[in-house]
Every structure is written in C-alpha cells, then in structure tokens.
Amino acid sequence: MKIAFKDKKAALTRVELLVVLATKGEKPSLPKGVEVAAAVTRELENGFRECRVTDALKGPAKRVLFVGLGPAKELTCEKLRRAAAMGVKEAKKIEAGSVAMLLSTEAEKQIEALGAGQALAEGCGMAAYECTRFKSDPRPSKVKTVALLGSGAAFKKGVQRGDALAGANRFTRDLQDAPGNLMRPRDMVAAAKKLAAKSQRIGLKSLTEAEMKKLGMGSLLSVSRGSEEPAFLIHLTYKPKGRSKGKIAIVGKGLTFDAGGISIKPSAKMDEMKYDMSGGAAVLGLFHALANLDVPYEVHGLVPTSENLPDGKANKPGDIVTAMNKKTIEVLNTDAEGRLILADALAYAVQKIKPDTMIDMATLTGAVIVALGHELTGMVATSDELARALVAAGDETGELVWRLPMIDNHKDHIKGTIGDLRNINGGQGAGSTAGAAFLSHFVGDVEWAHLDIAGTAWGQDDRDYVGGSGGTGVGVRLLINYLENR
Ligand code: BES
Ligand code: ZN
Ligand code: ZN
C-alpha cells in the first residue's frame, strides 16, 4: 500500500473511498464536487471512533466514510493515528483500491501540521500491516493507494516521516510474527544484511561464535550451546550525514525461540516464545527507519541472537560461565537466558563502542507483565534525564513507558555464592528489576536504560493500527522519537 501527500487545493481525482476525519459537532466541508445525502451530514455526531459510510451522490469519490475524532479540544496524535487506521481498515473491508483521506478544518487547527501529517501516515501505514505470507492463498488487501490531503511543506514532510516509521513498524512485525523455524539466528543476520545493503549510511559486522569465543563471550555462548543453530552478534552502524552529535548504542534481545533450556518452560503457550526476539527485531526496525530519516547521531545497533533449547550440551542449573568483562555467573535458571546474552552484548558495547548512552530492549521477564500488563513498557534507568526523555517519547508515540525503581539492594540480590553473580535473585521478588539489576553489572559507567518489552511486544489491546494478536513493533517509533528530540 502506497501513502502519498496530495495538495488538498488540487481537484480530487477519482477514488473509491474518501475518508473524512472530523471533530465532535463539526459539519465537515467536502472536497469540491463531492456530494452526499444531506441527512448523512445532518446526523453526524463525530464521537471518537464513530464511523458512518455512505455512497456519494455525485463527484469523484465513489463512497465517503466519516470517522469521528471526538471533541476538538481533546484531540491528540494518538487519536489521529487511530481514526486514520479505521479509515484503512474500512477500505480493506469494502475492498476499495484507492483511498483519499481528509482532515477537517477544526481538527487541523488543533495539531501542528507536521505532527498531524505524521500521525495520519503512521496510522494508515501501520493499519496496512497483515501477516498473510504463510498462507497457501495469501489474498493480500486490495487497498493500493492512500492519498493524504493537506497543504504546506510541514504537512507533506510529516506524511513522509510517518510513512517511513510505519514501514519500519511493519518490517519489525514481519520479523516478530515469523515462527521459530523460519526466523532463526541466521535469518536475523540475513535481515540485517539486507538492511545494510540498501543504505550507504548503514554498515554491518556480524560476529560468529568463533569470533565471540576469542572475545571471551562465555555468557552468550553458553546459551547457544544447547542448540543446533549457531549464535551471532549483529552489529549495525548508522553514520549521520553531517557531524555526529554523539554515539548511542541500542541493544536488542534476539532469542528466536526460548524453550527455557534445561529449566524448561511449561508447554502451554510456549509457541509465544517465538516473540523472544522482539527487542532484536526492534533494533533492526530502528535501522530500517534510520535509512529513511536524518538523525544527527552515530547509532550502533547490537543484536545478540540465539535459540534457548534443552540438549546434552545445554547450560545446566548451577553451571558457572564467564562473560567478556571477566565476571563469573552462576546460571541458576537456564530460562533467565536473555540477560546472559545481553550481558556480553552490553560489555562489548562498553569496551568496543564506548557510547555516550546505551539503551537495551528485551522481552526479559514475565514479571513485567504481572506489574504493568501489556500496555506499558517497564523501564529501569541510571539517569533521571534519560528516564524522563524516554517517558516523554512514549507519551508522544503512544508506546507508553513506565519507570521501575532499582536500588542497591536489588543489585546485591543477584550477587553469586561461589561466582560473582547469579542470573536470578534469591526469591526477593521484584522480578523485572532483578533482570535489570543483573544487566547493570555489565554497563560500566555508561548512561543506560533498560526497556522490558515482554508485555508490550505483542498481545496489546486493539488500538486500530496495532494490537490484538501478533507483534506490535514496539520500540521503533519510541527510539526514533527519543533520538530526534535528544
Ligand atoms: N523470554 C522470557 C520472558 C518472557 C516471559 C517474555 C513471558 C514474555 C512472556 C525470559 O527468558 C524468561 O524466561 N524469564 C524468566 C526469568 C525467571 C527465570 C527469573 C521468567 O520471566 O519467568
Ligand atoms: Zn527464558
Ligand atoms: Zn527469553
């Protein structure tokens, strides 16, 4: 599906569906020539998400769909995303090949043009996502084009940005939704290679197990030992066009399937563990977006990627492994494997990249779902400024973030008995913070935030453009927003 800006002063060309987004109580004016029955416009209330579709009596649009935005004073970008998404969903339902979308004048007054263009394009582009490629008869959606009607350079720029972000979101969800047998560590590497090949500004190094062994990454390698599939450490680099304002490292957990290892998971819903690579997918999605946007930082993306399976060579509870920073770890639970692969990726970033700021994204704990559910990402951060910036990015993108505490006691809870550390605490609770506390031993004194996306990576409430079953692509729009406002 193609999304394009179109000047709303130009005559509307023939479309199968015209979508009009209007605020509560407003009687929106239609593009020149488009006429609908007077009774329809008279009856419009435009409560948020209220829809009314009608055949046009005359003019270039075959049908017109009105989508309500609710009270003008309460309008937000999130509401625009959702209303726009409803337009695309309706177009899919009625099999409209061509769509034009118009924001009412009252709505236009509420949100600045760049933000409005971006939110509309994001909503449309994300709603276009569908996972049909594993069907023998895929029948993709018939919607081919969406023209976003507006005026001015800012609105047009917003549309282009929203289109790029929605594209990156769909790319991420495609990786997430693929099953474990088709999205193996090597497939994550292949996806990274494709990204790097498409952009001059993106470079790729992918470390093999032999190379990781030389670097002393015994923690990461202990996880892949129980699998036939070799692990990799993907290292993507984005260089800005102009002078770089600093170096940021983003690390994503890329567990393509987590059976738990010897501490095996219960079989119910184990299939959901194909989503355990969502942090890594978001890092790749971030680079998909970076290729199409101008971010003034040097960005490093690290994805440790592996399977976690039980086998004769697998980690056993109690085993001691040594990470790249020489710290020894008692693996008391082989299902707490995400932190084992992230430990070496974080230590690598600190030693080899020396970033100003480091952020990791990981489906790290079931405990974060107990604490926050599926609508908020749990965050632990070492600086208040970074925490505030990520919460603000969450509010703007709708990818909400909630900060969790971490005190010295939490760090002490994961100290080892015969080794330096243990990969789970001793039953003191605070499971999500415990994961972060473990990771904190591998970040040196680099400013750092940990985002536990175990709840938000999939299975969110339906928000029209995302949610319901399937991956959400969480993290991509969040981190682009963070990088752009930093
Ligand atoms: N990948 C899981 C976390 C997870 C659980 C993500 C449910 C999404 C939904 C992680 O590797 C894991 O198994 N964590 C353990 C940690 C525990 C052993 C301390 C967990 O949460 O149970
Ligand atoms: Zn696990
Ligand atoms: Zn896991």
Image: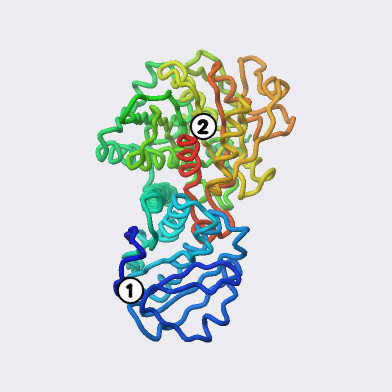
**Would residue 277 appear left or right of 438 to someone viewing this image?**
left
Circle 2 — which element? strand
Q: Is residue 366 above or below residue 67?
A: above
> In front: 216, or 378?
378
Check contact, mark 1 vs mark 2: CB within 8 A: no
Instruction: Tell me the kind of residue under disc 1.
Output: Val
From the viewer's side, name the closer residue of 325 and 349.
349
The disc placed on residue 15 is: 1
Q: Residues within 10 Å of mark 1 (few under 14, many from 20)?
A: many
Residue 379 drawn above or below residue 56 = above
Vertical side of 273 occupied by 64: above or below: below
Marks 1 and 2: which is nearer the front?
1
The residue under label 2 is 360
Dividing the picture into quadrants, the one containing residue 431 is top right
- Give x and y (percent) for residue 294: 36, 37
Any mark on residue 68, and which? Answer: none
Rendered location of residue 203, percent (x, y): 29, 30
N-terminal of the pair, mark 1 or mark 2, is: 1
Q: Which residue is drawn at 31% across and 66% down?
A: 10
Instruction: Give how far across and how far down residue 258 sits, in percent.
Output: 51, 41
Most foreground residue, 463 or 431: 463
Residue type, mark 2 in image: Asp
Is any part of residue 138 visible from this angle? no
For disc 2, the neighbor class at 10 Å (few under 14, some 14 to 19, many from 20) is many
